[in-house]
Image (cartoon, rainbow, N blue to C red):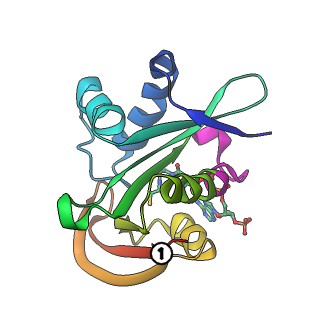
Amino acid sequence: MTLIRPYLETDWPALWPILRATFEAGDTYAYAPDSTEADIHRAWIEAPSATYVAIDASGALLGTYFIKPNQPGLGAHVCNCGYVVAAAARGQGVAAAMCEHSQREAVRLGFLAMQFNLVVATNEGAIRLWRKLGFAVLATLPRAFRHRQLGLVDALVMFKTLG
Ligand SMILES: CC(C)(COP(=O)(O)OP(=O)(O)OC[C@H]1O[C@@H](n2cnc3c(N)ncnc32)[C@H](O)[C@@H]1OP(=O)(O)O)[C@@H](O)C(=O)NCCC(=O)NCCS
């Protein structure tokens, strides 16, 4: 059973290792692989409008996502989200549950659409999942992501109108 609830500051000691391991890999997010704990706390917790965690029945942390306006002012009705699932919890529908939850939260917060700005083209599982959940690929940005193992690879802009 996966429960999704708002992030609490007491989640950070369990959350930081999951985020650090994901960003250190340098294959899915643009955060510098050597980002500090403070950098990532700012980006994942402080800057977004809201952050959530997915937990199992025992309260163990399975994943997390944030939601924030993709642009200021006149572009602020389109939101952006980032999702990470703990390596040991992948392939069990946690990201699917978080993305469905984030779309409901986005509507509740007044957003009209959701945009992913930099979906790494080699992240095939994520692309398949976002497509299945109704996101369209609107653009391919040539060599826009510096993959830690593969070098320069394409990245996709994905978009879904909500409501
Ligand atoms: C991408 C990510 C969020 C997916 O999380 P997850 O909880 O494993 O995904 P789910 O279990 O909800 O997967 C749902 C579907 O996507 C498919 N899928 C997910 N990851 C996959 C992968 N690596 N390869 C192939 N298919 C994958 C699953 O097979 C499943 O399809 P199905 O329902 O038809 O069986 C997770 O792998 C992760 O945190 N990766 C690192 C960070 C990242 O890439 N975030 C997204 C950036 S755009």
Quadrant placement of the N terminus: top right
Residue under label 1, please give it: 160
Task: Give percent across and percent down for residue 27.
Answer: 37, 55
- Magenta residues, start to end: 86-97
- The percent position of residue 14, horizontal first and vertical second, equals 52, 21
Query: Which residue does the image show at 73% across and 32% down from the upper left?
Result: 56
Q: Tell me the quarter of the picture where residue 144 sits.
A: bottom left
Percent x, y for residue 83? Answer: 48, 50
Dividing the picture into quadrants, the one containing residue 80 is bottom left
Q: Residue at x 33, y 56 (%)?
A: 149
Q: Residue at x 48, y 56 (%)?
A: 106
Q: Which residue is more in the foreground, 81 or 74? A: 74
Which image quarter has ligand 1? bottom right
Decide whether residue 39 is among the magenta residues. no
- The amino acid on which the numbered mark 1 sits, given as a three-letter code, is Lys
Height in image: 10 above or below 106? Answer: above
**Residue situated in front as seen by the camera: 125 or 46:** 46
Above or below, 62 against 38 in this view is below
Query: Which quarter shows the C terminus?
Result: bottom right
For the residue pair 137 and 45, the one nearer the viewer reads as 45
Q: Is residue 92 magenta?
A: yes
Q: Position of residue 49 (x, y in %)?
A: 36, 42
Residue 107 horizontal side relative to residue 39, left or right? right
> Is 109 placed left or right of 78 in the picture?
right
Residue 22 sits above or below residue 55 on the image? below
